[in-house]
Image (tube, rainbow, N blue to C red):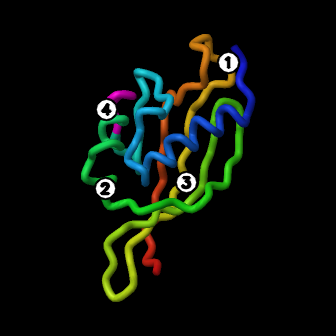
Amino acid sequence: MTFSDAERIAAAQAYIDALSTHRADAVPFAPECIRIEIGVKTGRSGDHLRRSLNSGPQFKLIEGTTPPEYSIDGDNVRAKFDVLTKPRLFGRRVCTHVDETFVIPADDPSGSPKIQHINAKLVPFVGR
């Protein structure tokens, strides 16, 4: 089955939404999906990533995300957005510019677009 760019972007958006909602049950991870963050493996399977998004302490600090800018190149869906954290000190908080590439094949016999791999680049910044 072949998926449109919009369907593949929707799969990536489900992941981005789960960063701040902490509800990842609808994120379409492939079972073997892994996530690499700044060269370090931070997700070892779709189930592991789902559990982490749902209840991992590293994600509980996230309050929201900015609307992503998407681009597509082959099976890669790239999203650039900011992650906004909850803790504040003197009106400021540590936030992160995120450049995340999702491998979501346009052709997948499973019947729905699945996130096969995630590669994240992060740059922290201080925001309001």
Q: Which residue is mark 1?
A: 107
**Nearest to N terminus: mark 4 or mark 3:** 4
**Nearest to N terminus: mark 1 or mark 4:** 4
**Nearest to N terminus: mark 1 or mark 2:** 2
At horizontal 45% and vertical 66% (from top left) the residue drawn is: 84
The reply to whether dot 1 and dot 2 touch (C-beta < 8 Å) is no
| Amino acid on which disc 3 is placed | Asp
Name the element at disc 2: helix
Q: CA distance from mark 2 to mark 4?
A: 16 Å
Q: Which residue is mark 4?
A: 48
Name the element at disc 1: loop
| Amino acid on which disc 4 is placed | His
Q: CA distance from mark 2 to mark 3?
A: 20 Å
Q: Which residues are the magenta region?
A: 43-47
Determine which of the numbered discs, if any, sits on residue 99 in the image.
Answer: 3
Q: CA distance from mark 3 to mark 1?
A: 24 Å
| Percent position of residue 21, x then y | 42, 50
Q: Which residue is mark 2?
A: 60
Left or right, 34 with respect to 104, comes to left
At horizontal 39% and vertical 28% (from top left) the residue drawn is: 46
